[in-house]
Image (cartoon, rainbow, N blue to C red):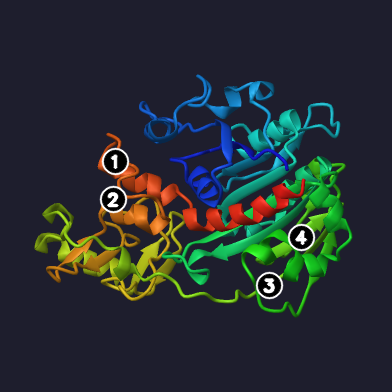
Amino acid sequence: MLKKTVCELFAGVGGFRLGLEAASKEWKTVWFSQWEPGKKVQWAHDCYVRHFGDVNSDTGIDIACVDKSTIPDHNLLVGGFPCQDYSVARSLYGEKGIEGKKGVLWWQIRDTLIAKNAPFVLLENVDRLLKSPSKQRGRDFGIILACLDALDYSVEWRVVNAAEYGGQQRRRRTYIFAYKNSAKYGITQKKKTAEDIMQKAGFFAKTFPIEVIKKFTECEIDSDDISDVSDNFKFAFENSGYMSKGKIITAKTSPILELPIPLRSILEKSADKKYFIDDKVMEKWVFLKGAKRIERKAKTGFSYTFSEGPIAFPDNLDSPARTMLTSEGTLNRSTHVVKDIKSKKLRILTPVETERIQGFPDDWTNTGMPERFRYFCMGNALVVGMVERMGKTLNKIFAKE
């Protein structure tokens, strides 16, 4: 059996690690990286260390400053990286060598894969990754696929709504699973059709079952010149797909639904009075949550109507939570407002409730960080229960390596 060693990049407060260790105590994180630009105190990193311990002095600095060859060997690379502009530029002399834009974190993942050659990769991103940028739909994800293809990985992806698979939040995220074609798993998968992998024999099909796929779309990508991919590639990626040896197949899939966890079941029985909405700002909350049509004028002088629909106010306690954002807890349209179970008065969520929505243990972020940053960390986090499900599928794959 392959050793379950993990490198966790952009670790946040440890969602990937919690999920994997819930799937098996054999998963061992040998190195991690967490650094928040522009922050004097690295609260998320310190929270991670508080729970898991540190590895070395490089875990809390900019990953771009880390010599990737010094990272311990590992068999699984994981990370939740931000959706950015992944476009690349040719070198000054026009060779095929590429240089990613400074600060774009995908290139740090690629550099780590080049240096450490991990046989398996599991990544998380927002669902819009598949359709960005707006002027060249699919280019950014195409660059990622081309980079992985150039390093001899096959790739699966799936947009997962956690609530559709028994979670407590309607959070949609793109998960990417890549594996070396030389791995035993890769050799086994080569014998199967792309359609079969997507429908029942692949990583995501086994982890998150779907209804029968009716229509597939295909294309090819040239990983020999990723700069050309950056300049010219565009493709309508659907919420599921598979790529091997540059051949891409994608389809819109529907989940075999599981009962979600309602918001009511994760609320605290008693909340501090500071979380309750003061009558003085109630009118502002009503405005933010309500439908509106506002006449506006652009800087160019062009007049237009800004409109948006209403958001449930308060949130329905018999449904799972909406997607949490980093602005959770502030006077903001996206912040959850609930009717307190005990007093029946309106209030925002407590930090513990946001932790429960993401599947973290109570008070996970109660490590001395400011309360505002506790909300921020949970808005940035992933759903631990979804990682646990994927970890259980990885257990079976690693057992055969």
**What's under tag 1, amino acid-wise?**
Asn
Gap in angstroms between the C-alphas marked 4 and 3: 12 Å
Q: Which numbered circle lies on residue 179? A: none
Front position among marks 3 and 1: 1
Quadrant showing the N terminus: top right
Quadrant of the rendering where the C terminus is positioned: top right
- Mark 3 is on which residue type? Lys
- Are there few (<14), some (14-19), or many (20+) residues within 10 Å of tag 4? many
Q: Are marks 4 and 2 in contact (CB under 8 Å)?
A: no
Which amino acid does the dot numbered 2 rest on? Answer: Pro
Alpha carbon separation for disc pair 1 and 4: 40 Å
Disc number for residue 242: 4
**Which image quarter: residue 158?**
bottom right
Image coords of residue 89 (percent x, y): 74, 36
Separation (CA) of disc 3 from disc 1: 40 Å
Q: Amino acid at mark 4?
A: Tyr
Question: Which of disc 2 and disc 3 is earlier in sequence?
Answer: 3
Q: Sequence-wise, which precedes: disc 3 or disc 1?
A: 3
Residue at image mark 3: 252
- Asked if labels 3 and 4 touch by Cβ distance under 8 angstroms, the answer is no
Give the mark toward the camera: 4 or 3: 4
Say whether disc 1 or disc 4 marks the residue closer to the N-terminus.
4
Question: Which of disc 2 and disc 4 is earlier in sequence?
Answer: 4
Q: Position of residue 222 (x, y in %)?
A: 86, 49
Q: Which mark is residue 351?
A: 2
Q: Is residue 42 visible?
A: yes
Q: Is mark 2 in CB contact (under 8 Å) with mark 1?
A: yes
Secondary structure beneath dot 4 equals strand
Q: CA distance from mark 4 to mark 2?
A: 38 Å
Between the residue at mark 2 and the residue at mark 1, the CA separation in whole angstroms equals 9 Å
Badge 3 element? loop
